[in-house]
Amino acid sequence: MDTIANPSRAEATVSLTINGKPVMGYEHETILHCAKRYGQFIPTLCELEDIDHAPGTCRVCLVEIEQSGAESKHMVTSCNTPVRAGMKIETRSKRARAMQKLQVELILADHNQDCATCTRHGSCELQDLAQYVGLKENRFYDPERVAARIVDTSSPAMVRDMSKCVRCQRCVTVCRNFQSVDALVMVGTGFDTAVGLKYGLDQKTSACVTCGQCVLVCPTGALGEKDETDRALDYIFDPELITVLQFAPAIRVGFGEEFGLAPGTNVEGKIIAAVRKLGVDIVLDTNFGADVVIMEEGTELLHRLKHRGQPTFTSCCPAWINFAEMHFPDILPMLSSTRSPQAVVGKIAKTYLPEKMGLDAKKIRVISIMPCTAKKDEIVRPQLGDDGVPDVDVVLTTREFARLLKREGIDFVELEPSTFDNPYMSEYTGAGAIFGTTGGVMEAALRTVYKVVNGKELDKIELTQLRGFEGVRSATVDLGGTVGEVKIAMCHGLGETRELVEQVRAGTVDFDFIEVMACPGGCVDGGGTLRSKKKYLPHALKRRDTLFKIDANRKVRQSHNNVQVQALYRDFLEAPNSEKAHHLLHTFYTDRKRAMTLTVKEVWEEITMSTSVY
Amino acid sequence: MTEIAYGVWQGVVRNTKSGQLPSADEFPELKNFETFNDGNAVRAFFGDKGFFVFDENVSLIDAFWHYFNKAAEQSCGKCTPCRVGTVLVRDALDAMRRGLDSSLDLDQVQILAEQMRHTSLCGLGQTCANAFLDALTHFRDRIEAEIARKAPVRAQNAMTYMTAPCIEACPSKVNVPRYIDYIRDGRPAHSLGVILQKYPMAATCGRVCVRFCEIACRRNLVDEAVGIKTLKRYVADQQKNGHSVIFNREMVEEPLKPSMKVAVIGAGPAGISCAYHLLLHGYHVDVLEAMDTGGGMAAIGIPSYRLPKDVLKSETDIIVALGGRFLYNQALGRDYSLDDLFKRGYKAVFLGLGCQQGTQMGVPDEDPTLEGYESGIGFLLKVHDHVAGTKKVELQGDVVVVGGGNVAMDCVRSAIRMGASRVHLVYRRTETDMPADHEEVVAAHAEGIDFHVLTNPARIISENGKVIGVELTKMQQLDADAKGRRNVKPIPGSEYLLPCTTIIAAIGQQVQHGSILPKDGVGLNKWACVDVDQAGQTSRPGVFAGGDCASGPSTLISAMAAGLKAARSIDDWIKLGHVRFFPRSRIRKMLNENHLLVSDIVEVPIRNEYRVHHPELDPEVRKNMFEEVEQTISPEAAYAEAKRCLRCYRVYEVITEQPIPEGAA
């Protein structure tokens, strides 16, 4: 379908003027889009073209129009007003500029202006906007109104600070139209309108899966991760503790931009150097955990393939696990019981590693750097700890890690790249590296499963036929031997996932193995990655390409050939899916679906702005 | 009297003092504006297009404070200028009316008002500053003089009313933009709650309503009306998906003692709605129904392919959940009289009898006792039994249905599902004249019905007590009459024979003969319907009526509205001995009589977005079955459709001499 923003096929046939210059617009094209094509800047706030979002609520992108035949001029919002033949558009008239400026001043009337303490300081779209419109005064600001706004800190992963919300509703659109989680709603009316959770719940008890895609589109600091940089520093600077840090496959390709490097630059070596400089004792790689996951999940898959008829779903992605538990609990038996790479590294770092290195396991604190908000939620799952002691102690998102380095005054760009040096848990293969992108887990698993079935490696290591970028991709792969053909599918983004899961439940599709990543694109675009202003996931493909390059350049490219993984099994776990491996590296899931029943009375008590009868 | 001292309407200024007196065609002549209620003079009126002041002593600042107070309270809070502007202007006016220094001066307030008018997203924000800006432009001296006094203004009696064209068009006055807002906000339960404030049968109405609201919808001026009915059905149908809104006895705020009981006669839409509101008022309600099932015309008159029986039942069950009782197989006139009911201790009675006697065509040889002769309503009753499985009906051969209304459409579409080899629809005017919903006509065509328009029955042909055919005559259109309607007359010599096994006369209905007897003391009007006043009171004290039995065959939504109105009247009558003045009805009347409602112009371009349509079963499949043809729309479609609403809210205000008496809730 053609979207308004991208009128394809059609010719630009609508003749009009912008600031006196003749231009040609497409039929149904918005004034904003047309102006952009002609290089005419109009300040905007709520609009976000990448998610087809122009609710017209902030009312900042005002332009003055004169329609042919009309007597007077009108102010309209350019984001949702279509061009018309003969229209004369003034984007910079005195009236337009004055009204744009006043609009921003009105937005600030109840906006928390403690900018220095805000995580978006310096990268805030509202700050930019105030500068664009030349705001000089703030006459309507009332701190009491700010104090009345809700700040929801109930979730271990995310914070929703309504004192910084501009009601652009981008988060609602992403949650609803892209992730199909539909947890976010608009609540309240009039001055108190805000973003809330469905059924009046808080972030923790709601149907939110903490994927964090809402954070990526928020123009201000209203949505964000729960900041844990202080806790990480507490661990690092406690001389009694041994800090172990792991970072996810996607971190190394999605971190350099923060320091001015080109998107997709591989900064693995610099990250290792930076972490050492921070004072962390042991640096590990989550990629190692990914290789272990392949050994466990691959073995589990082969076992499950003996009884076909229902698919096995991957279990690396914690937002996907939340989604399944809260929205489709009936499919939980189809989920692989293998823990995620982060949880695998956490557990091994507190069992095998101290055994090997002669450390006191009680003194170990595991810090993870993840491109993910849901990983913060994952580590507090009781089944991923031992007697209340979590396997991973703290998760920092990519954004927090960047903040941490800045706090510690580390000049990232100037750092000399370093390498891993832990002899037990830092080696990784190309298979582990590609876990960070959609299709990567599948490709890594098939490389190993093929070897197990056939006793030899795949002739062609790269399964390029799986490397598309569509929301759902499927293929039939011949694994040979006693297994033969398996039907596989990979999907990314929970909207696509919901459709696929519904098809699986309805029995209209037949798959053996399905990889799911909750974030569109996979972990490289996770909800914990760096934010981009006025863009949604602009660097997805560059980050992905770098992951494939890392894989291509690895000497060892199959998880089972990772010598440290081989040592782990030889010296500690015995074999994949052994009793010990099951005990340490597998988990279980619980039905967390909540049916919400409201009485009409409860609903009526909440209804405002409608004639109340009773 | 109604002498306007000064005012502005659609930019035209009237000022008696300065002799600025626009002519009648420039300025509205106000009818019925002297008093709001008995002896209570109207001092001023404010709306979206301007204002009229009748009393020189009215405080404009206080009046506009009331107006902005309403606007701020009703702002949906999505767009910046309305969300913040209404509050800032309101607070500034509040300080001024109290004689205090406002943090914003008049110039600043004016800039904010301009910002709201010119940059707000919806009708509320765009219009709520209009009258104020007119006053600032043309009568600024008066406002400045008020401020200069630096003393609190004497409190004025004000009533504000916010409405929209769709609300005014709806007999039940459902707050349509509000329930659409709640969908857009992602809160379907609250959306349903808005509808439930007016009547319990939301899923039913969401399927079969005739949609006066959509005719009034201003989105028609852009592309197509918002799919209001479709959205209503969407929220009502969310009840199935694990999340639900439930009724229980606890929601009755103040249960009354057991002797406070009311009898509702007829479990149709009017009776159900009346019983629902009486129960919520705390009464003990018995619903006496002649049939063995609830729903009335919604049950028997609407086939299950449009309204599944379980959907309807779940809504009539609400009465039971609220503590009401259904007494089935109880027919007025046969099993009891009105006197019997009062003897049993009922404080009041509501008549919701409906119109269930089919009207005859009045053609030669018409005999309702003939085998194969049916009235439309009688046939639908058989269809109901057929679908319910209580009595199978098999049709064969050709079936002829006479009429062009929704009942006729229901008859033809049911007949094709019951084995008729061909189904003919005979209507004396043209297809565009048919009073049936357009969608129904389209669906009937799709299912293969033969339309014979400009055709009328002339004689029924029978043999051995069985219908074997009908003689039809072609009709021709006459010139348009004064009302623009083109009448028809037969074309002599055009008669022809259409053989058939069944003829169904679906041309109208009346109150069932024998239900209301002279001894009941309830007067009927010249159309043989129950005579009622504005409040739904009949000629017999304590007896109220509404729905088809009072109005003649009408719509589901009108019947439910009548039930609500009667419930208010009954509550007043039992507790106070009389029915109270109802302020909202009065202000609506002022608006309608004087054509003060919103204009029908959309001045700026709006992106076209066409409305969503229900997924439908294939006509070839569905014409053999009675399962529901239209399916519920998806959440994605509902969100998209909800965004099409332009929210044409407008605020109106009257200032009166005396306090306005409190009306029924």
Image: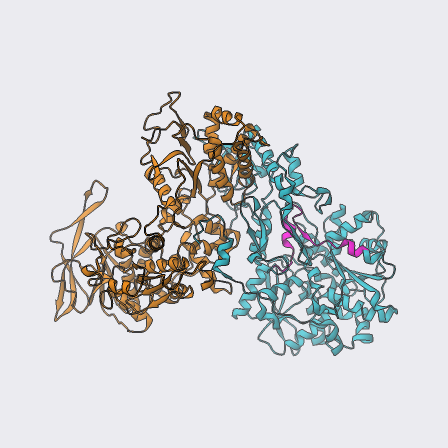
As for residue A604 lying within the magenta part, the answer is no
As for residue A215 lying within the magenta part, the answer is yes
Tell me which chain appears orange. B
B464 vs B394, left or right, is left
> Measured from the top left, where is residue B575 in percent x and y?
36, 54
Quarter of the rendering containing residue B221: top left
Quarter of the rendering containing residue A145: top right
> Measured from the top left, where is residue B485 in percent x and y?
23, 44
Quarter of the rendering containing residue B618: bottom left
Q: Quick one: A38 or A72, which is closer to the camera?
A: A72
- At a point 19% along the width and 61% down the height, the residue shown is B519
> Measured from the top left, where is residue A155 in percent x and y?
67, 58
Q: Colour of chain A?
A: cyan
> Measured from the top left, where is residue B322 in percent x and y?
42, 63
B321 vs B186, left or right, is left
Boundaries of the magenta span: A208-233
